[in-house]
């Protein structure tokens, strides 16, 4: 069940305080990463239009393809906590790793984020090993996943 989404809608810009909180929570979420195989810590934080923040971290398992990335770890419980037809409205996502330049969401997560983004302008902020003091990369989901295949395309097949 999906509804046609106007993917060119502007998003409400984050205030400096909101961005700092989003980034800080994503950076802090790295401490929850369970990554004994890769030692590649990732923290993520999602800000919803309701003003709530939701974090996630990567969780690996011995059968490595079974693990889940921080971004999907953060988003899935939000979606799963709502009774349909309600869906969350994402305002921004922050992702934090320990490398410079900052890492971007993997292809699988880009597709996952795209599924729940209500606009292609959803901003994704990426932080590296120096956290708030280091380089931050900001890109939109539309830039990270151009020519995306998403819910609207499924609806067009009806
Ligand atoms: Zn990923």
Image (tube, rainbow, N blue to C red):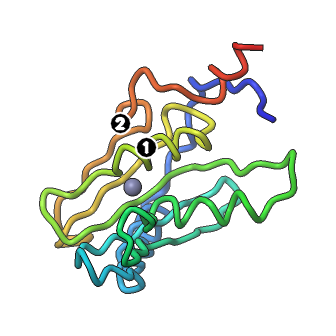
Q: Is residue 51 left or right of residue 16?
A: right
Which residue: 86% across, 49% down? 84
Q: Secondary structure at mark 1?
A: helix
Element carrying mark 2: helix
Between 63 and 143, the one lying in front of the other is 63
Q: Is residue 96 above or below residue 144?
A: below
Q: Is residue 74 above or below residue 138?
A: below
Between 131 and 111, the one lying in front of the other is 111
Give the Cα distance between marks 2 and 1. Answer: 7 Å
Q: Which residue is mark 2?
A: 144
Q: Earlier in the sequence, mark 2 or mark 1?
A: 1
Residue farthest toward the front in the current orientation of the protein: 63
- Indicate yes or no: mark 1 CB to ligand 1 under 8 Å: yes
Residue that numbered label 1 is attached to = 110
Q: Is residue 2 left or right of residue 59?
A: right
Quarter of the figure with the C terminus: top right
């Amino acid at each position: 069940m999906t509804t046609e989404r106007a993917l060119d809608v502007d998003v409400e810009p984050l205030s400096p305080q909101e961005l700092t909180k989003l980034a800080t929570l994503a950076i802090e979420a790295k401490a929850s990463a369970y990554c004994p195989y890769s030692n590649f810590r990732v923290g993520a934080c999602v800000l919803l239009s309701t003003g709530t923040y939701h974090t996630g971290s990567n969780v690996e398992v011995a059968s490595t393809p079974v693990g889940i990335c921080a971004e999907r770890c953060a988003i899935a419980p939000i979606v799963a906590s709502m009774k349909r037809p309600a869906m969350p409205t994402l305002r921004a996502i922050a992702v934090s790793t320990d490398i410079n330049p900052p890492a971007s969401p993997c292809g699988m997560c880009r597709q996952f984020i795209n599924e729940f983004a209500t606009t292609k302008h959803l901003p994704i902020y990426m932080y590296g090993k120096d956290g708030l003091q280091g380089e931050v990369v900001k890109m939109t989901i539309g830039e990270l996943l151009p020519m995306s295949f998403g819910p609207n395309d499924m609806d067009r097949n009806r």
